Image: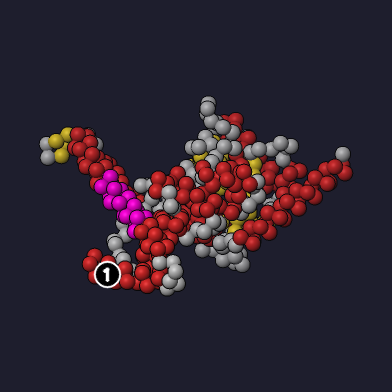
């Protein structure tokens, strides 16, 4: 069975149409009005996309049904321990002989696993390709699988993006410090942006930069690498981030200051300012970010927008310094430790535990001062 990736096909057709549009507005094409011709072309291209989409969905549903029939047939012969292995082997040989490649033993096992993971036919989405479902079927934990399923649809991830988010332990990073009901909500709805700290991941994983953990590099090197890999960085940041500027100059009383990176989030309706720190975070860094956020709040916010937030992306952070530098009740400035390699679950757990201990220590110190 030939594997069709709807996401890639959709992007190819969309790129073709966008390129065509740039060259055809307000001109005549063989004596025909350019806008009129564009509309006709758009209709045809949309039809092509729908055809690919329908073919893809047919592949998904047929794979599901083949998997269902294999499972049911195996159950009939459950008194024979080797029945399942022999069934798939013989079935593969016969189907390959009649229909050609696509029905290897591995593919048939994938269909069987796919059915066992998604037994409710009504949950199958035509937004996802067969390749998406193969990747999702590898996730044993149902709560985690539902999260990635919803995020694939909501964020329109390609298979490659899904694989990267799984490898970077996105679900664990969002949920390890959450209560059970919060984890279930994230699983059922995906990652929702309802408050400023929903925009912040800690740690932030930048393995795609290719920078060595033990090699010395400057903040400008980190910034250049992020710009060169902007698409991957936007994926790591999350939903509907738009890049606005790098080294954004602001002038305060004749003094120039430069914000490393500026983004805008359409869901949160706010600017997101990012400053990069390759060394240990200081109170001066925090104070400077407070100034940047104040500037954007007073001069750049439009009616209907929310207050900007600032993220200090650093290699080392000290939450106590941040807490005592910022005013009480701060909801606009956050820190995130970046790492240049894919984390493990144990490393994430250790990070969460360290932060919990630090919070407990701060609470005890505050009570002593009172």
For image coordinates 59% across by 33% down, the residue present is 307
Colour mode of the rendering: secondary structure
Q: Quarter of the image containing the C terminus?
A: top right
Q: Is residue 354 left or right of residue 82?
A: right
| Total marks placed | 1
Q: Quarter of the image containing the N terminus?
A: bottom left
Give the SS element for disc 1. Answer: helix
Along the viewing direction, whichever of 192 and 277 lies nearer the viewer: 192
Along the viewing direction, whichever of 257 and 299 lies nearer the viewer: 299
Along the viewing direction, whichever of 257 and 303 lies nearer the viewer: 303
Magenta segment: 49-66
Q: Residues within 10 Å of mark 1 (few under 14, many from 20)?
A: few
Look at mark 1 in the image and give the residue it sits on.
94
Residue 55 percent across, percent down from the top left = 28, 51
> Considering only vertical position in the picture, is 304 above or below 123?
above
Q: Is residue 24 in view?
A: no
Residue 365 percent across, percent down from the top left = 84, 46
The chief SS type of the magenta part is helix
Q: Quadrant of residue 350?
A: bottom right
Q: Reply yes or no: does residue 238 show up in magenta.
A: no
For image coordinates 27% across by 67% down, the residue present is 95
Residue 97 percent across, percent down from the top left = 24, 70
For image coordinates 32% across by 50% down, the residue present is 57
Residue 102 percent across, percent down from the top left = 30, 65
Q: Is residue 364 in view?
A: yes
Q: Reply yes or no: does residue 61 show up in magenta.
A: yes
Q: Is residue 164 left or right of residue 307?
A: left
């Amino acid at each position: 069975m030939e594997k069709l990736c709807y996401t890639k096909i959709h992007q190819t057709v969309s790129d073709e149409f966008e390129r065509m549009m740039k060259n055809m507005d307000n001109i005549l094409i063989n004596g025909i009005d350019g806008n009129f011709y564009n509309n006709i072309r758009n209709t045809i291209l949309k039809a092509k996309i729908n055809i690919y989409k329908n073919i893809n969905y047919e592949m998904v549903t047929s794979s599901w049904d083949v998997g269902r029939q294999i499972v049911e047939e195996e159950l009939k012969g459950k008194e024979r321990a080797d029945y399942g292995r022999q069934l798939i082997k013989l079935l593969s040989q016969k189907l390959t002989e009649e229909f050609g490649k696509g029905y290897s033993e591995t593919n048939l096992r994938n269909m069987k696993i796919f059915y066992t993971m998604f037994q409710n036919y009504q949950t199958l989405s035509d937004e996802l390709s067969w390749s998406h479902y193969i990747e999702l079927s590898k996730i044993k934990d149902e709560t985690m699988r539902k999260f990635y399923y919803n995020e694939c649809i909501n964020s329109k991830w390609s298979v490659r993006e899904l694989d990267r988010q799984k490898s970077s332990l996105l679900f664990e990073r969002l949920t390890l410090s959450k209560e059970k009901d919060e984890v279930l909500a994230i699983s059922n709805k995906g990652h929702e942006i309802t408050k400023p700290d929903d925009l912040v991941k800690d740690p932030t994983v930048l393995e795609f930069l290719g920078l060595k953990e033990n090699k010395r590099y400057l903040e400008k090197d980190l910034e250049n690498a992020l710009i060169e890999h902007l698409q991957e960085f936007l994926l790591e940041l999350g939903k509907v981030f738009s890049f606005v500027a790098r080294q954004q100059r602001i002038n305060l009383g004749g003094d120039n200051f430069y914000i490393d990176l500026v983004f805008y989030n359409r869901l949160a309706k706010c600017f997101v300012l990012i400053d990069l720190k390759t060394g240990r975070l200081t109170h001066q860094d925090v104070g400077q970010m407070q100034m940047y956020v104040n500037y954007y709040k007073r001069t750049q916010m439009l009616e209907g927008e929310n207050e900007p937030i600032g993220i200090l992306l650093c290699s080392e952070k000290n939450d106590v310094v941040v807490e005592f530098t910022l005013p009480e009740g701060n909801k606009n400035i956050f820190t995130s430790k970046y790492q240049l390699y894919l984390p493990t679950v144990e490393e994430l757990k250790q990070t969460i535990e360290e932060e919990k201990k630090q919070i407990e220590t701060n609470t005890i110190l505050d009570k002593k001062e009172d």
